[in-house]
Image: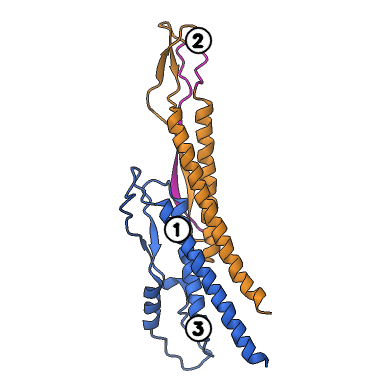
Chain colours: A blue, B orange
Amino acid sequence: MNPIQLFELASRQAEWLSVRQQVVAGNIANASTPKYLAKDITPFSAVLDNTAMVQHMAVTQPGHMASNDISADNIDIEESELNDEIGIQESGNSVAISEELSKTGEIKRQHELNTSLMSSFHRMMLMTVKR
Amino acid sequence: MTDPLSAALKIAGSGLEAQSTRMRIVSENIANARSTGDTPGADPYRRKTITFGSELDKVSGAQVIEVEKLGFDKSDFIEEYDPGNPAADERGVVKMPNVNVLIEMGDMRETNRTYEANLQTIKQTRDMISQTISLLKASQ
């Protein structure tokens, strides 16, 4: 059975958001670690493009192993670009706490939008089934 | 790899722990800002320093932060002329700890801010988890 496309997209974005939250939490925790460079992950659109291009493995029977295209594997962690205002500190650390905090706020907002959209679409689907 | 959100909670938790150790060191330094030696000419309290490092937690695969090293500030002691002090040497000079209270205060502020930032991460991660859980509750 094909997954319902909208829900698949939403769960993929939720996964991307949680990976990003993990990376940002790492940045904030390492705000005073010497020689630590701030990290970020590839944008969601790039992740989406990448997974769309992946060819599914040919299967001769539906029960065979399916390639799992929803996974954290195709989300890459990279060094985030340098904040010019703060730059690299004396200790070789490049984390800007204010920027990381605004990132977590944005992640939370997007996650909230994601989950509310999911629940409202789910409600709409239930409505069509009920009566 | 485990769930990124619980890994985020773990990372932020390790950040809280590291910052509280840093706060301990700061308070030790401030409390001992005037601790001299016991015998004439003896060395006084030496300022302590703390260094962090990130480490891979093998169970969750997360980069947690840990206290890497507790060290000592090797800078020179401050010399004060105070012949009445029991720790004064034959010239009447007492060695005072190499603690600068202003620097310690600055460090304390920074510790406070970083602790707050980690706490905020925990709050937001927890909210994200409960949003996902409430998806199940809403669809009765």
Between the C-alphas of marks 2 and 1, the distance is 53 Å
Q: Main secondary structure of the magenta part?
A: loop
Is residue B85 found left or right of A95 in the rendered image?
A: right
Residue A125 spot, x, y in % from top left: 60, 87
Looking at numbered disc 1 in the image, what kind of residue is underneath it? Ser
Residue B82 vertical position relative to residue B13 in the rendered view, above or below: above
Q: What chain letter is assigned to the residue under label 1?
A: A
CA separation in Å, label 3 and label 1: 28 Å
Q: Give me the chain letter of mark 3.
A: A
Residue highlighted by disc 2: B85
Rendered position, A44 above or below B112: below
Measured from the top left, where is residue A11 in percent x and y?
51, 76
Q: Chain of mark 2?
A: B
Q: Label 2, label 3: how many angstroms apart (C-alpha)?
A: 78 Å
Quadrant, the N terminus of chain A: bottom right
Q: Amino acid at mark 2?
A: Asn
Q: From the image, tell me which residue sits under label 1.
A: A102
Q: Residue at x 49, y 61 (%)?
A: A105
Whether the magenta-drawn stretch holds residue B49 is answered as: yes
Mark 3 or mark 1, which has the lower sequence index? 3
Start-end of magenta stretch: B34-58
| Residue at the left extreme, as displayed | A84
Residue A65 in view, yes or no: no
